[in-house]
Amino acid sequence: MDDIKRKYVIPGDVITTGPYRAEENVNLVGDRMIATTVGISEIYDSGVRVIPLTGMYVPRIDDFIIGIVKSHTSLSWELDMRSCYPGILPAQDVFGRDFNPKVDDLTSRLKKGDLVAARIVNFDRSRDPLITIGDRDLGKIEEGELIKISPSKVPRLIGKRGSMIQAIESATKALITIGQNGYIVVSCEEPEGLLKALDAIRMIEEQAHVPNLTEKIQEMLGSNSE
Amino acid sequence: MGVRKSDIVLLDDKGIRCDGRKIDEPRNIMIKAGVLKNANGSAYIEFGENKILAGVFGPRDVHPKHLANTDRGILRCRYHMEPFSVSERKNPAPSRREIEISKVIKEALEPAVMLENFPRTVVDVYIEVLQADGGSRCAALDAAAVALADAGIPMRDMVSACAAGKVADTIVLDINNEEDQEGQADMPVAYMPNLEKVTLLQLDGVLTPAEYKKCVETAINGCKIVYEIQKKALKEKFFGDSPQ
């Protein structure tokens, strides 16, 4: 962990030269590793990558996401998941194998604007990402407040081994569902806890690049509770 | 001293231009990234008297659908001058000149934007010229590049643009409006500073081969100055004043 070198970069910045492997958001030109997006570059023994600070969500297989139902055809729903492609949720996934488009009405299960917790099962850029809700803890989200943050700040919100999110959840008694695409649903019985959790998430979004953020958040939650 | 008859002295004996600059000095440049809330990325530039706003959307679904490309994304660009951007009202409908500038800006940005990562999508760049002075295509391109980076669209390199030209038989950097009207040549150049590649080169006027070479070199030096300012604008927005 300690030998990772970090640097702020913008597109075109030469991160380093030499025999490294170009990973996420890095372009290899000759022997120069060039950043392709605004972010924080990391050099570790095997490669170089840039953690983006802005940009759209890029779907990855097995990611847990939260989607908003945009529309539907007779066979599937289309979900907005803050990506450049809509997520496709097949009706069979919800109705089961005996789904019949002549009989079953898709709007009876999911309507426009509904929130869905889902997982990406397939994506290869030649087709729109296929998503599923046929798994434990997946499906329509019945209640909660939706908050949108940049997808690149999701790891910061979760924290090291979930430390940040646990800190917020235990201080506010809120239940926070985080989608890798930056959509977050917060539900809480007490309105104060809900407001406090939302404030904490907004603060993380604003100060994601600041070190020791977990302590700052704990401080803020602690001082507010009195 | 200029070769054409004019009331303005384009270049005096001490090598000072009509607006008080030296021959290798650009106008004052200020760039601010992320000025619009609803666009995915945006930038505002003041390049001398030019005031230009750029907004970027995307990558997003292509409409109309038949324009979509199955193996790469497409880039669309609109350069538009406000009716109040010039001293006499400009018709807001796209003019021949605006259509041309939209096209050259698109083609100057295309080598930098990694569109192959986003098949079937479009990146839209909208540029609004609020106030125009000479060299607005270069300033627009500078703002568009910052807006693209602000939107988080992967780019091989930034694109920096600056013009050079020939005024009173001398090659000068960053032509302003008077010099554009009265001077002998104008050469806008866009350049990728780290890859060292030129993405736009236009020339209006007549230059000898030696002057041409000097003009390109001067413009590229200007692009490097602009690049530093673009870099500063992006770092200011994303990293604030926190240490490296």
Image (tube, rainbow, N blue to C red):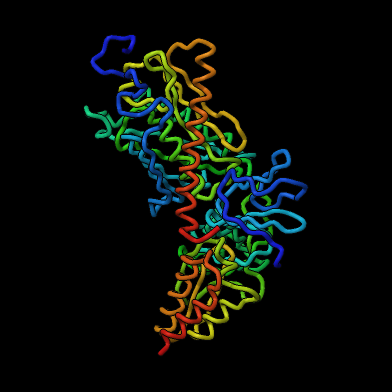
Choose between A79 and A190: the one closer to the eye.
A190
Between B84 and B7, the one nearer to me in the picture: B7
Viewer-nearest residue: B162 or A189 = B162
Residue A163 x, y percent position in the rendering: 60, 78
B170 left or right of A3 in image: left
Residue B105: percent from left, percent from top: 47, 31
Q: Residue at x 73, y 41 (%)?
A: A31
Query: Residue at left 55%, top 64%?
Result: A153
Tell me where residue A118 sits by quadrant: bottom right
Residue placed farthest to the bottom in the image?
A: A226
Relative to A67, does residue B112 appear above or below in the rendering? above
Does the image show residue A130? no
Badge count: 0
Residue farthest to the front, as pictured = B14
Relative placement, left or right, of B236 versus A56 is: left
Would you place residue A145 above or below residue B163 in this image? below
Rendered position, B45 above or below A3: above
- Quarter placement of the N terminus of chain A: bottom right
Residue B92, position as x, y percentages in the image = 29, 32
Image: B77 above or below A149: above
